[in-house]
Image (cartoon, coloured by chain):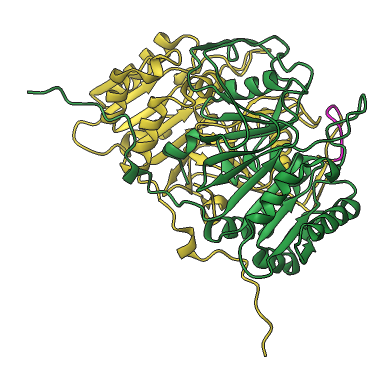
Chain colours: A yellow, B green
Amino acid sequence: MTKKKVQTAITPAKLNRIIPKGKLLAIGGKEDKGEGQPDEKPENINFISEQVLKRFVAELRGDNPMVLVIPTASEIPEESSQDYVTLFKELGVTNVQVADIRNRPDANLPEYLEMIKNAAGIMFTGGDQLRLTAIFGGSDALQAMKERYIYSNIIIAGTSAGAAAMSTPMIYEGESQGGYIKGDVRMTTGLEFLKNVAIDTHFLTRGRIVRMTQAICTNPECIGIGLEEDTAILVTDGGKMEVVGSGLVTVVDGMGITESNIYEIENGQPFTAKGLRVHLLGNEDTYLIPAYERLQLQ
Amino acid sequence: MTKKKVQTAITPAKLNRIIPKGKLLAIGGKEDKGEGQPDEKPENINFISEQVLKRFVAELRGDNPMVLVIPTASEIPEESSQDYVTLFKELGVTNVQVADIRNRPDANLPEYLEMIKNAAGIMFTGGDQLRLTAIFGGSDALQAMKERYIYSNIIIAGTSAGAAAMSTPMIYEGESQGGYIKGDVRMTTGLEFLKNVAIDTHFLTRGRIVRMTQAICTNPECIGIGLEEDTAILVTDGGKMEVVGSGLVTVVDGMGITESNIYEIENGQPFTAKGLRVHLLGNEDTYLIPAYERLQLQ
């Protein structure tokens, strides 16, 4: 008699997953670096590298593709969206529209759902990611975007706050200079075009690897993706990732953590973790997001 | 010509969802009420109503069904699990085993995966929910449980911390007495047997509706379920909920929120919200979790 083998790996058939037909482009953004300026400062699109935005345009499908700019994260939505309208036109996109959704009732208006239905590409501007989840969470507009992402060849992009909100969980407030104190990192669920991924931006220049590690320690099912400025990830098939841009992408993988004190200490105490794996990826590097190969609840 | 109708509702065919075959039982728990005792105090099972545990036993399927006790949330795992072994035997379950998983390496051991594979029911004890996500997140044991939950007729139960960790997002630290200050509620992703649901326990007696509302405001895609002591929800088909027990279940639905200042204020300031819907449900009441009917990423 042979000993019964324990089945641990999930067979591909069992994954039985809906692979989204759409693509995602999460851009690290780059804000002015004046001393003391908050992360929430509206994104200045002049700093986004042309390489990244040209890739966005190159991924648009269909004849005379329409790009929809969503400036909801920004506190100056008219200015933010007008910048993108001008920029995309310079890059050869003739049909650029703006869904100037400013609150939750707006996010259920049929005119915006119609725009989402017709868009070949969507661009979320920078600003504050908490505006995106608090306004779009549970809305018809978000459902319409998910339907497009799962069932059509749309590309959905976001920069800075727009990138952070794409995935779940979402970090929305934290101590950039440290993050080693338990409780200093605030998270909620994101818009969930990706899951079990936490995206953070301005990653290396602002030393955010520690606050990311704290987020990962609380549930290592999730991996952290730190986007450097002028750098993006293009996600296809729901979890295949390619780096686009001049900077680095940092992957923080906590699945192999062997020890952490995060559940033994009180808020306000420093946390520790052993066994973290970190990958630094550059332009054209690829990576398969681990959740892609793991059984998930739909 | 008729005006083109905007498709907003998701058609059932488009949901194309895997409906889990398993069931969930999330129990509100009841800890000693001594002044100043933390929520993390290990669960005293004597306080769980017999009605709830008898329902758990009644839902077990198969001949001589095995119940697996997982005391990982508890700081006194031997004591916690022994209490349950005794209790289930009193309720007529002859085959009770314990998966005494204490750290992340344990959560990948074949002996525990074998137990999970053979269990008809799983019971997560109380303790600290952050222990559950930090230890099980990304583990083989969690994958094995998800496989059982999705593809078999297992029942997975948890009390107090064990209930809070079942769903995502998961509240793991907060100001019970208030929660109206932005930043006072700490969340991460849970074990995700349910999603877009935040479960909190000891709900009305400890005035936790405000901290729950803050959690919901950050992303109203998620609904809050507040479990009273001695009260549980039984979840079937991945999202159909039935109340079991002597107390109330509070549903906090933020999808209709029209205004909130949560994204306009800094941490440390009081938040506001308008348009919240609240349901108070009692024994045998049913409720369909909204995420069940919404398009989700797998």
Depth check, front residue: A161 or B274: B274
Question: Was residue B217 drawn as part of the magenta stretch in this picture?
Answer: no
- Residue occupying image coordinates x 77% and y 38%: B29
Please indicate, yes or no, whether residue B165 appears anywhere in the rendered image: no
Q: Residue at x 92, y 25 (%)?
A: B36
Tell me the quadrant of the picture where the N terminus of chain B can be found: top left
Left or right: A215 in relation to A249: right
**Residue A264 left/right relative to A17:** right
Question: Residue B30's x, y, as percent?
Answer: 81, 36
Q: Residue at 62% of width from left, 31% of height from top?
A: B282
Q: Is residue B221 left or right of residue A221?
A: left
- For the point 50% across and 10% down, the residue is A75
Residue A71 percent across, percent down from the top left: 43, 17
Q: Nearer the viewer, residue A128 or B26?
A: B26
Residue B169 in percent (x, y) is at 62, 35
Pick out the residue farthest to the left: B1
Range of the magenta residues? A264-268
The residue nearer to you, when weighing B237 against A156, is B237
Up-down: is A257 above or below B218? below
In the rendered image, is residue A15 in sight?
yes
Number of marks: 0
Residue A267: in magenta span: yes
User: Is residue A139 positioned above or below A13 on the image?
Assistant: above
> Residue B291, relative to residue A101: is it above or below?
below
Q: Position of residue B267 (x, y in %)?
A: 70, 15
